Image: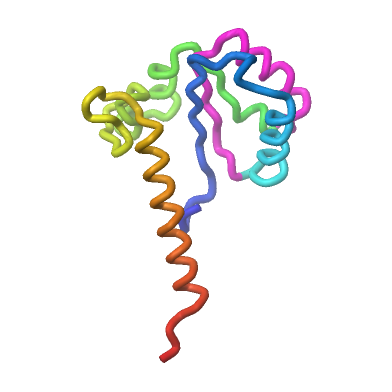
Amino acid sequence: MPSGTTTFCVVADTKNLGLKHTNSQFLNALLAMITTGYPDRLGALYAGPVNIAVKAIFAMLSPLMPKRLVNKINLMNKPSTQLCAALGNPDSLPTFLGGTATHDIVDEATGEFSWEMMDTAMQAAKKKLQLDRDDDQFPQAW
């Protein structure tokens, strides 16, 4: 995480999520990663709009989670409205989540979030991070 950042927020679009999109091994691995690697780093997780599948998954996993983690999970029926209210500033949310901020991973033609653009941005960020790390570890001595 960037210097000075101690927590992160996850926003999950669960609009079309169904039980066929999940499996118990993946969910258990995800739960293990969050509870062992990042329990104090996760500031909040917002998921919505909720449906029967999301409620069932949460009902299965929540008894296995530490209470402090369960308290950070927010299931939302109307994510755009609830996210703006929860985060307090629509200027910090991109338009595809109901806010007013422009975002570089929105397809300009459709105004919708683009997984491809996000993947490209994440790969570029990962590459830059690796190059920065390499430069820090092996400074030019002469």
Q: Residue at x 69, y 23 (%)?
A: 23
Q: Quadrant of residue 55?
A: top right
Is residue 69 placed above or below 124 in the rendered structure?
above
Residue 3 horizontal side relative to residue 52, left or right: left
Q: Residue at x 30, y 31 (%)?
A: 106
Q: Residue at x 27, y 28 (%)?
A: 100
Residue 92 horizontal side relative to residue 50, left or right: left
Q: Quadrant of residue 28?
A: top right
Q: Residue 98 at x, y = what percent?
A: 34, 21
Q: Quadrant of residue 38?
A: top right
Is residue 76 placed above or below 66 in the rendered structure?
above
Residue 14 horizontal side relative to residue 120, left or right: right
- Residue extending furthest toward the right: 64
- In the image, which residues are magenta? 41-67
Is residue 114 placed above or below 78 in the rendered structure?
below
- Residue extending furthest toward the bottom: 142
Q: Residue 67 at x, y = what percent?
A: 72, 30
Q: Does 139 lie within the magenta span? A: no
Which colour style is shown?
rainbow
Q: Residue 68 at x, y = what percent?
A: 68, 33
Q: Does 44 lie within the magenta span? A: yes
Asked whether 57 or 19 is in front, the reply is 19
Q: Residue 19 at x, y = what percent?
A: 64, 14
The C terminus appears in which quarter of the rendering? Answer: bottom left
Asked whether 19 or 1 is in front, the reply is 19
Q: Residue at x 53, y 45 (%)?
A: 7
- Residue extending furthest toward the left: 109
Is residue 132 placed above or below 11 in the rendered structure?
below
